[in-house]
Image: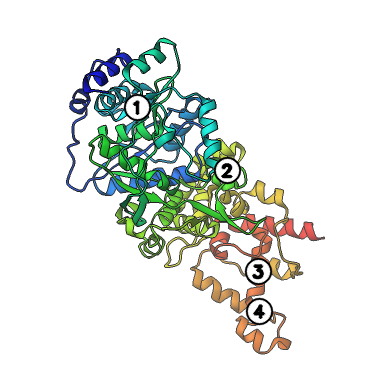
Amino acid sequence: MSEKERIELAEILFPNIKHDRAYYENMYPERNLPEGAMVTRYGPSPTGSVHLGNLFSAFCDMVYARQSQGKFFLRIEDTDQKRAIEGGIDNITGVLKGFDITPNEGYSYGGEYGPYLQSDRTEIYQTYVKDLIVQGLAYPCFMKEEEIATIREEQEINKIKIGIYGVYAVDRDLSLEEVKEKLNNKEDYVIRLKSPGNAKKEIEITDCVKGKLKFPEHDMDTVLLKKDGTPTYHFAHVIDDHLMHTTHVIRGDEWVSSLPLHIQLFEIMQFKRPEYVHIAPITIKDSETGTIRKISKRKDLWAGVKYYQEAGIPIDALHLYLATITNTNFEEWYLNNKDKDIKDFEFSFAKMAIGGTSFDEAKLNNICKTYFSRKSGREVYNETLDYTKTNDPDYYKLLEENKEDMIKFLSIEKDGERPRKDIAKYSDVKEEFSYAIDSLFEEENYSKNDSDKTYDINLIIDYVNNYLDLNVSNEEWFNKIKEFATNNGYASTPKKYKKDPDNFKGHVGDICEAIRVMITGRTKSPDLFSIMKILGKERIIKRINLYQNTIS
């Protein structure tokens, strides 16, 4: 077609499009940001619920934009209306807010580069497609599904590349009159790219994570607009990333194969190309097959974000874990910098894993325990109270009724060089500190005692009634209980007992263990004397009596 005919065709196809490209270029000017600032976007589709992999991608968008004084925005890519689920958009925004991954702008946040819902931007996409028609870089394609299926079958038989290109792009060179005739016959059509690519040529792209990548040029006449006039993902994201001035496209590496098309679209549109950052997926070793696979919401409980909310894993602790996936050197930095915040860490694309990143539950637990160990007892109490208000109302009430004691218990062994690490999630507080509340302790009735030892109950009663002094220091208390042990035929240290076991009934540790079991219901707990001081002698005696009644 001549230029005049292409202009006429563009007007026939898009009679309602009155603006030109320049209109939108002026509407969305360059951002006023410091040099080196990154503009990132999280562009989810509302076709399913958010999982850990999605959260990881959004987290990367946030931290890289934040540390460079840039912008992170949320764009809802809802061009695939057939697959959209009810409540899909609310799920996306709710999860982001619930996990404190907060865009600077975007859908539900506002901003000057909206609308941030792609279905509200159809006129913009059609404006740019209209321009491509005029340039001869796009065309209406009237091929029916049956024709395309036949072509695919032929290509499969001949073992050649599948798609609409070259001789298979049968509508690529229709005359204006032929197009008009088909339009008059009310034939459905899509708008396809008239690809200038040559698959025999090679392009080279440098990915921020994967380094240099080489591909054949894209030569497919890819669909730009569907039959209903809405754009495909490939076309819409190129237009939006240009107008919203995205500098870094951070996305899963399943999109690597689409790079030749996306690069070609940026070049055809004469847009500045963003940097591409393809991140490795979160994987796991399948327990059934032994193979490495991507995470699955169906197979992996922890892949769904509800798992973290219901279990009571702190948002900040999950951020710390996501940071260990983001950069391989983060965990060591975090463990060695207890006075620093995640915002103090310098994230780098060079430290991102190129291959798959395995989900490591042990690492998650370790990060969470370290996180809790750096919190004061009062902070742990307040955060657990917030969690239980929704997730465990009965325990919430008990926490409120026993506030001061609970804060004291949660504060044990918090001030030393090696703070206690027994809590990995808020739900652990009830489990680990059930002995702190009398009603829970009595309800358990020593069911958590993992020892099969028989303790000298009379010895412990004698100690508590006649020797225990709670108004001394920890060191003084221990010296006195060692003295008590010696006076009653026990070694003052495990070392002495081990050296000559036949001359002793046991050692001081056995006496401490007996007391610990009787007043906490378990063989392991935080510092024993601290627990006794909080309980007080009256409650200690009451618990020893309960133990005596239980075993008798």
Q: Residue at x 45, y 15 (%)?
A: 187
The answer for how far apart the CA atoms under marks 3 and 1 are is 88 Å
Of callouts 4 and 3, the N-terminal one = 4
Which label lies toward us, 2 or 3? 2
Q: Are marks 3 and 1 in contact (CB under 8 Å)?
A: no
| Left or right: where 459 falls relative to 105 | right
| Left or right: where 536 falls relative to 14 | right
The answer for how far apart the CA atoms under marks 1 and 2 are is 46 Å
Instruction: Give the structural element (helix, strand or loop) at label 3.
Output: helix
Disc on res. 173: 1
Residue at which label 2 appears = 297
Q: Is the N terminus in the top left, top right, bottom left or bottom right quadrant?
A: top left
Residue at which label 4 appears = 507
The one nearer the camera, 537 or 144, is 144
Q: Residue at x 67, y 51 (%)?
A: 441
Residue at which label 3 appears = 513
Q: Is the C terminus in the top left, top right, bottom left or bottom right quadrant?
A: bottom right
The answer for how far apart the CA atoms under marks 4 and 1 are is 95 Å
Instruction: Give the structural element (helix, strand or loop) at label 1.
Output: loop
The one nearer the camera, 178 or 119, is 178
Where's residue 58, x and y in %? 40, 43
Label 4: few (<14), some (14–19) or many (≥20) C-alpha neighbours in 10 Å: many
Residue type at mark 4 is His
